Image: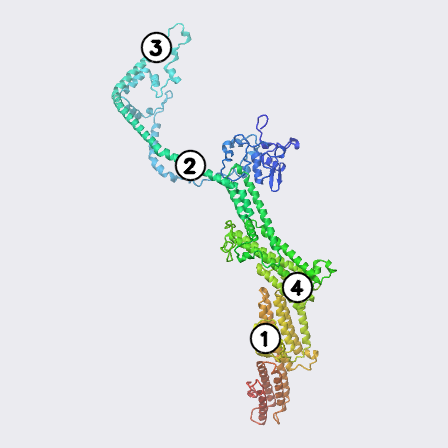
Amino acid sequence: MASDGKYVVPWKRCAVCPPDARPGGFVFRSPREFCSHLRDFHCTKEGGSFVCRYGMNRVCPSLPLEGVSDRDYEDHVARDHVSREPGVRPTNPSGSPDSSGCSTPVSQEPSIVQDQHKWTIFMSKTNLPAALNDPRLVRRETDFFTKTWGEGFDNYGVMPNPDIPEITKEHFRRYLKRISKRLKDHESSSAAVSDLPAPRPDQKTSLRPEDHFPMLMSRKIDKLSPDYEAIPKIRQLFGAEEAEIFMQHGFSLDNPATFNTVFPWSLVEPPKQEQAGKPRQSSKLLQEKLSHYLDVVEVHIARQISLRSEAFFLAVSSHDKLQENMANTCATIRKLRDRVHKLDDTMAVGPLRVMRMSQARANHLKLLHKLKLMATVHQTQPTLQLLLSTNEFVGALDLIATTQEVLTQELAGIHSFRHLGSQLAEMEKAIDCMMQEDFVRYATIDLNRPLTEGHDILEEFHQRNPTLTETQEKLVAIVLGMLRQKKYGFIDIYREESYTCLKAMLKQTVIEAVSQSDEVVEESAQGSLADQMRLLSYSTWMQLLQRIFEYLLVIIHRVQNVCLVIEELLNAASGTPSTKKDGPQSPTSPIRMSTDIEDLLTKSEGVRVHAMLRELLCQVCDHANDRCVKVMQARLKEGFLERLTSNEFVQLSKSVEKFVSDCEKLCGKRSTSLRSCLQSQASRFINRFHEERKTKLGLILDNERWKQADVPSEFQALVDHITQSGRLIQPTKNLADAGKRPQEYLLVDGQRYAVVGTALLLVKMIVDYCECCEDIPAATPDILSRLIELLKMFNSRTCQLILGAGAVQLVGLRTISTKNLALASRCLQLVIHFLPIVQQHYEERLQGKQANMLKHFDHVLKDYNDHVAELSNKLLFIMDGMLESNLNKWEVRPPMPSAAFRNISKQICKLHEGISELLPPLQIYSLFESIHNNFKLFLRSQLIKSGVTNDGGPQHGLVVQDVTFYVGNLQSLIGLETLDTDMAAIWDKS
């Protein structure tokens, strides 16, 4: 309010900033500009809160110094600064400062303390039209609606009300039909009136209906007395104008016009020029005239009374009866009133008094309930301290929530509890901090316990012991409190503590191993821990690695136990059935909840926290694998792998694979870091492993003399073990087999295999590759490709040495004999026998797209079968050459049998003698059958050339003797008794 009494809008000018701070001063054209100025120059932001500084000494008298939210700040500016001057404290209607700002904001429920100060429409000092038409506002501020709801707000028309139907002519059809007859009568009457003659200009128009409708006048005359005919006489007596005045329905002398007409002043007071000489006779004349009028009226009144005397007498005679009836009615009314009063006393006053007392009692009970509730709320803080002393975090949080709810609903507006809400909120924050600190303390103690302890802290929990230790109860209370507050960050805290524990344990274990080892001299102890660890021998380092794996699994088990406890609590809190037989609320469960934790979480929240726990365990396992990778990388430097033997690397691989498998069983997820590290190292190892065996096999093949070798007992035991178990692994050593003598043949499924030493070595190498695959599953595809390469190398080198006669130059053989060919064929058949077993072994270990590598076995099998067929063809080719050369020298002449047939029989017997102990009988039979068929073809060709026919002549007899000699020798060979020796085809000339 300005000093001159004129009202100044508060937002027009800033009351704090000096006017000369900028040209024109701080003058604003709208409240929005004023609010923007307050936010930019008179507001500070502290954290996420806004503090108003608009006032004297930069202190706002109506906003607390602790700050409010953005929306509350805007409401405060609009309420306290846009409509009031700064520094003026808001007052309530009574004129006292408003203390509602000090009370605790509770809820939107009615409050007897605050509702009396709320603004209502009756407190408005202006109305909307006045606000819109205020000449002091700039033009654009008259847009009261469009500035809030948009420029097009006033352009929208009013939407039609869907509840009001559309009115058509059909709705009035019944009405028009009903009123049409009356309308016709009205129109005909109106036409009759319009046909009356128009009045003359000097004639006064009468507005009475009787003047226009004579029948209506006759009806009125009939209703009047028989002396109605005296009315014209009265008109003649009084005059038309006076009679018209006196006979008016609303005649009254109070009307000045009527009074002047009845009492003309010209008759009462004559003009001034006539007052001096004439007497005042006009007044007497007027008095006589009026007296005459009175007499005439009295006469007519008397006549009218005499004419209606019967009606007067009837009224007088019935007056007494009416008085009697009135008296009776009054008496009846008095009795009725008495009875009503009695009924009121008897039936209404008492029950109403009971109702008032009942309402008073109900009000007293409500008041008592309020007082008891206030007393209970007053004991909240001591109860909270008691609950926190017993680690009942959930109970304490539930008590705070219940108290806050009571304060906002049932105890809203209680002045004594105005600060209790903020105190409880601060206490809730303190409980959150307390639970977090206790959980960190518990996690640190549990994870850093000695790793050699036989029992975990939570082992009794899973064994369902009847009681819980203090540590277990505290863990359950902390977890339930965290879940109650929806504070799931404790899972991340536990993850970080687990990482810290894993790192510290691993470092401590390496330090202990290095300090206890005699292999680390004092001079080298000055280097880093990784340098000192590299000085350990393989056996010491493997012991260290085994100990690390063991300790890591212990810590992971502890993390898993905590996760299991939390999962069971989650199941109980979300109402999900536990996957275990005994849940936390089962009769045999050691957990006894002091509060009802049912429906503490929704099912969706429970599922989300379950996923977080599973992810926690997987991340801990991955971190443990990562720490092991660092240990292995630090040790595998400086060519450590190249110095490992196959057995040592397999031992390392088995240890790593066992640890990875144990981690996978615990978390249900495969960790790839340690496996990848091992696989990268395994690739180098497999390269060396393969090169060693490939070189060894090549050297042995180059020095192989292709003679039948004895089979040591360990090779026979290996083959027997493969045949019986179906697995390509080395059998356990048997001392009884160590003293057995070597055998001449290798027995496989009842078949004898005469093989060279290279074939036995190849079988053992195949088993080594399969065992390596078993020990290093991650390198299975690489091992398989190397094994396929080894098998192809054996096949190709055998072909070069035997079919290509490379052995003649390398080992000094005179020639490649049929026995060499048979031994090579039999060695290839031995490998062919084991190929399906090898394929099945790898088929069980290859997954997904890796299974496509099994097609290489089909190619290898085809190559080996083709090689065996080539060897058989080679034998057949040798015999065909021998037969053809001998038959070309044959002459049909005595003595018989001829030399050619004797030489043929000798070579056939020699071939049979050489391969009968090497090849299987079925293959021998097939080979000699082919030789016999080729012999018949060669013999038939020679007979045709010599011109010998089966005519029974001398030459025919000589041929028959040679053929009989050949057939007899052929049938004498073992295994060829059933051979078809029919020689009739040699005489066929077609």
Q: CA distance from mark 1 to mark 2?
A: 103 Å
Residue that badge 1 annotates: 720
Q: In the image, 428: left or right of 320?
A: right
Vertical comparison of 658 with 154: above or below: below
Kindly identify which numbered label has been placed on residue 285.
3
Q: Name the residue rendered at 34%, 11% in the picture.
A: 287
Q: CA distance from mark 3 to mark 4?
A: 160 Å
Numbered label tally: 4
Amino acid at pointer 1? Asp
SS at circle 3:
helix
Q: Which residue is mark 4?
A: 542
Q: Which residue is mark 2?
A: 359
Bin the neighbour count of mark 3 within 10 Å (Cα to Cα): few under 14, some 14-19, many 20 and up: few
Per the model, the C-alpha gap separating discs 4 and 2 is 88 Å
Residue 329: numbered disc: none
Residue 896 locus on image (x, y percent): 61, 93
Q: Position of residue 319 (x, y in %)?
A: 27, 23
Circle nearer the viewer, 1 or 3: 1
